[in-house]
Image (cartoon, grey):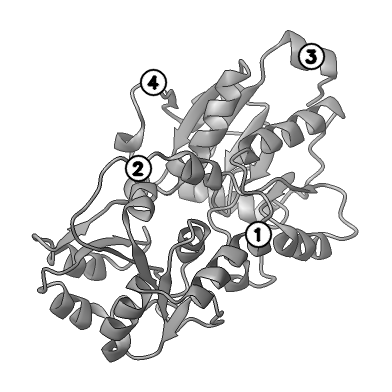
Amino acid sequence: MHASPSNIERKPLKFLFYVEQNYAFDILRPIQIEAINQGYQVKWLIVGNDASVQYLRDDEKMLASIDDAIAFKPDAVFVPGNHVPGFIPGIKVQVFHGINQSKRGNVYPERGLFDLYCTEGPQRTGMLLKAIKDKTHCKVVETGWVKLDALFQYQASDTFSRPQILFSSTFSASLSCAELVYEEIKRLSDDSQWQWIVTLHPKMAKQTVQKYKNLQGDNLVFFGNDQVIEALHRADIMICDNSSIFQEFLLLNKPVVTVNNRSPLDCFINITDAAELKGAIQQALSPSSNLIDKIKAYGPAITPYLDGNSSSRILSAVEEMIADGWQDTKPRNIIQNFKMRKKLKYWKY
């Protein structure tokens, strides 16, 4: 694939959004807004059983199949997840689905599948540059995390008469507190002094999700993965564990209580026993000035891009690659691409 600056001016670029999980919609929409504002085409490809077409809006355009995606010939494919099929044309752009780099360490199962990594800040940038040193098939560009554009641009309108407590948890058994705190949340949600909001990782065990859904009533509501930004703005405090979502909440300068966090920081309250939850909630609802100061210092430390313009920087990085005459020189990744074909049940060559 070749392009030049004149081609960019003459022919609008075509972008494909590759979606495997429902959380991808909130992540990718800021790019869609920016792309359409620049006169580019945007289409969505929703694959697998974990993402639902019902989350698409009426004005969003979906491709019905892999064949349609290939025929679309996108200039770039934007991916919040870890994998993308190499047989779809275009620059493969990793925009990430969270900002918690420490949870994954140096392990990148998607390494070799992407041409461009758009990172949120110096920590991930440095780790990726180290991981891909001596490799010339991909680039790392520090753009800021695109979901923060949607997070910061959201306008909350409702007000509530009682404190709103958001509970969220990751799905990995070794990192999750969902089962550990279930009975305590069940007990506390019987008290009408607080309103609970629960949202769980899309890969959470179905039986755990159902247990929390069964708690719904006057004092507890369950939010789907397409309502996360609304939940973050609505809540006064968050209860979490090791999920990257608590970092998004801290970026809104609001207190977080974590349960068995692997790397506790002084900008949140960490507990190790479910019995401590009520006291930690009360502490978070009346935070000390020192805790507030630590929370406010956290955002710039994790990502310097808090201006809501990350989508523009991402598109600029893509445009630059195209203008520089990008060619696909990634490894063939025969095993990974075979797995993708098997997963997608696509065997055309």
Task: Name the residue carrying label 1.
Answer: 300
Task: Name the residue carrying label 4.
Answer: 59
The span from disc 3 to disc 1 (Cα, nearest Å) is 37 Å
Locate the N terminus by quadrant.
Answer: top right
Q: Kindly identify the residue that appears in the image at 76 percent across and 12 percent down.
A: 9
Q: Where does the image place residue 226, in percent across and percent down from the top left?
A: 34, 45
Q: Which quarter of the figure has residue 326?
A: top right
Task: Name the residue carrying label 3.
Answer: 7
Looking at the image, residue 224 sits to the left or right of residue 173; the answer is left
Lower position in the chain sequence, tag 1 or tag 2: 2
Looking at the image, residue 114 sits to the left or right of residue 271; the answer is right
Lower position in the chain sequence, tag 3 or tag 4: 3
Lower position in the chain sequence, tag 3 or tag 2: 3
The span from disc 2 to disc 4 (Cα, nearest Å) is 23 Å
Category of crowding for the residue at label 3, using alpha-carbon neighbours closer than 10 angstroms: few (below 14), some (14–19), many (at least 20): few
Q: Where does the image place residue 294, in percent across and percent down from the top left?
A: 57, 72
The span from disc 4 to disc 1 (Cα, nearest Å) is 35 Å
Category of crowding for the residue at label 4, using alpha-carbon neighbours closer than 10 angstroms: few (below 14), some (14–19), many (at least 20): few
Category of crowding for the residue at label 2, using alpha-carbon neighbours closer than 10 angstroms: few (below 14), some (14–19), many (at least 20): few
Mark seen at residue 156: 2
Q: Which quarter of the figure has residue 293?
A: bottom right
Identified by mark 2, the residue type is Ala
